[in-house]
Amino acid sequence: MTTVAIIGNAPENHPDLTAYREVVDYWIGADRGACVLAKHDLPIEYAVGDFDSTTEAEKTVIHDTATNVQVYPSEKDETDLELALNKAYELHPTTIYLFGVTGGRMDHELVNVQLLYTILSKGIRGIIIDQSNYLELTFPGEYTVEFDANYPTISFVPFSKQVLGITLTDFYYPLSNANLSWGSTLCISNRLNRNSGTFSYKEGILLLVKSRD
């Protein structure tokens, strides 16, 4: 089982990255995200992007600290994050963490959340984490959610037009075989009653969001 972490170029609202040092096998910096890795003294296996948002001094740091640097033209079809993902896929991961991909431009943030679908479609678990949120996309099935004091509030947001047959067990607000559609707030701001709970559903695509105020 291989875990890859990608650091994007969004504002630095990421959690304590050093807490993931022992669980991440490969660190990839997307554009200026490589500078963030260097700042936290984390290994940079790959630095990928056009690096148009970095200064000459930062570029020197990246080239001095990264094991591999791949520079692309600024005019390209993919974002720097997507290029970093393509590199991550080559490592055959089971899990990909995305840090530094929220809190900046809304167009980038929305498409970054949609990239979770691309990751999941490849059979890889994709997770976005920042200081206030944990996002993970799911396909139909049954899942266990562990209590996390850093992100105690749990919400479920329909990613497809409809999500059918959702059941929540050991939640403060339980559900049994309910349906969700775009715009529904039925599954916003829930909490676990125990150290863990389960959710399941039959059809659709569901976004799990764990957060804190």
Image: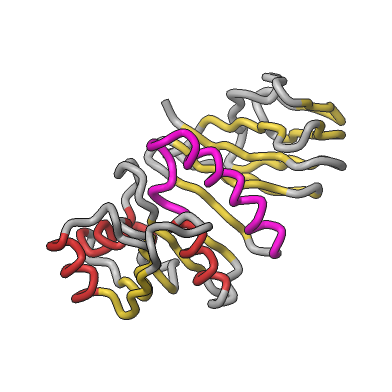
Q: From this viewpoint, is residue 18 visible? A: no
Rendered view: 151 above or below 43: above
Q: Where's the N terminus, which quadrant?
A: bottom right
> For the point 39% across and 53% down, which residue is it?
8
Rendered view: 103 above or below 182: below
**Extreme bottom residue here?**
67
Q: Is residue 64 magenta?
A: no
> For the point 72% across and 20% down, which residue is it?
184
> For the point 70% across and 37% down, which residue is it?
159
Q: Nearer the viewer, residue 187 or 85?
A: 85
What percent of the width, then of the height, locates residue 45? 36, 75
Q: Nearer the viewer, residue 205 or 152?
A: 205
Magenta segment boundaries in residue numbering: 97-122
The quadrant where residue 39 appears: bottom left
What percent of the width, then of the height, locates residue 136? 60, 46
What percent of the width, then of the height, locates residue 132? 41, 35
> What type of secondary structure mainly makes up the magenta span?
helix
Q: Nearer the viewer, residue 107 or 36?
A: 107
Q: Left or right? Give the position of 185 relative to 104.
A: right
Q: Where's the C terminus, which quadrant?
A: top left
Rendered view: 162 above or below 202: above
Q: Nearer the viewer, residue 57 or 39?
A: 57
**Extreme left residue here?**
57
**Extreme front residue here?**
75
